Amino acid sequence: MIWVDTIAELRKIVSGWRREGLTIGLVPTMGYFHEGHLSLMRHAKAENDRVVVSLFVNPTQFGPNEDLDRYPRDHARDRSLAEGVGVDLIFAPLPGEMYPEGFQTWVEVTGLTQGLCGKSRPGHFRGVTTVVTKLMMLVGPDRAYFGEKDAQQLRVVRRMVRDLNIPVEVRPVPLVREADGLAMSSRNVYLSPEERQAALILSKALFAMRDRVQAGETDVHSLREGMESMIKAEPLVQLEYLEFVDDETLEIVERVERPVLVALAAKVGRTRLIDNLVVGRL
Ligand code: AMP
């Protein structure tokens, strides 16, 4: 596995692969790998001749009071995990390589970024779409892999690729959970044992809601109340948002009559977690 930290080296290697006619899969990440990341890499490996993983804690997608400085990092561990699943190249630039002095160009998706995490994290998606566009321009991948864990991000990136005619196929990968239901996240390391236990209420509430939908309940008001009362009973967890939105447009819905994304964000202690489920899929 090759490890590069400059754009020049990255370009040299991927253009060589391209000349040989090899297909390339891109997996953008912020590192501190867990099974969710490895699942994206395995999907990329299965569908492409070469896999490029970017490992970059992108400063422009963090707000001023967020966890940029304490975001977990462990390059040695990430290197061996990626190597273990057959990744061909890791691109791990320093911030100055991606955002040189005088940087002033942004890529922004408007409508889809207004609700959910876009509301509570202003500027977040502008940072995401800008860095993902740069990575796509640098690597020129045939396919790029995004997890359903970040459901809104996936939909925003898909729209950006469509709207800007970026020649890449966006491939969604299912959300990977711990055995007890907790959505895997690099941020789970922040949780104390008590918080880790309390955080389980988020997936439990989603699963209970799914059971009710499968039993025929369609009224969002009632489904939401059920989830809120479960989550409110857990004092260590503060719900930031809980929304039932159309799976494609992300517009608020009142009934589950077509695929509905049920997405939430919550603070567990100081740690912000997100989780989601899609219900009403045929
Ligand atoms: P991150 O490093 O958290 O920015 O995530 C990098 C990529 O991995 C994104 O496309 C995420 O959606 C995806 N990812 C993170 N956690 C999970 C998970 N538990 N299951 C599936 N994909 C995930």
Image (cartoon, rainbow, N blue to C red):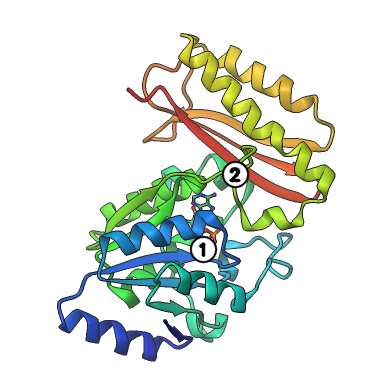
How far apart, in angstroms, are the residues tagged by discs 2 and 1? 23 Å
71 left or right of 100 in image: right
| Residue 86 coordinates in the image, percent (x, y) | 39, 71
Judge left or right: residue 73 versus residue 210. Answer: right
The 10 Å Cα crowd at callout 1, few under 14, some 14 to 19, many 20 or more, is some
Q: How many marks?
A: 2
Comparing 107 with 271, the one in front is: 271
User: Does any atom of ligand 1 lie closer than 8 Å to the CB of label 2?
Assistant: yes
Q: Which residue is located at x 47 percent, y 70 percent? A: 84
Position of residue 274 measured from the top left corner of the image (x, y, whole percent): 61, 43
Q: Position of residue 162 (x, y in %)?
A: 26, 52
Q: Residue at x 47, y 44 (%)?
A: 151
List the residue tagged with mark 1.
Answer: 127
Residue type highlighted by circle 1: Gly
Q: 141 or 98: which is nearer to us? A: 141
Q: If you read the primary sequence from the N terminus, does the residue marked by circle 2 or circle 1 appear first? A: 1
Query: Label 2: few (<14), some or many (≥20) within 10 Å?
Result: many
- Residue at image coords 60%, 77%: 75
Looking at numbered disc 2 in the image, what kind of residue is underneath it? Ala
Residue occupied by mark 2? 183
Report the quarter where the N terminus lies: bottom left
The residue under the point 48% across, 27% down is: 252
Q: Is residue 231 above or below residue 75?
A: above
For residue 243, side relative to residue 140 (left or right): right
Q: Secondary structure at mark 1?
A: helix
Q: Nearer the viewer, residue 273 or 200?
A: 200
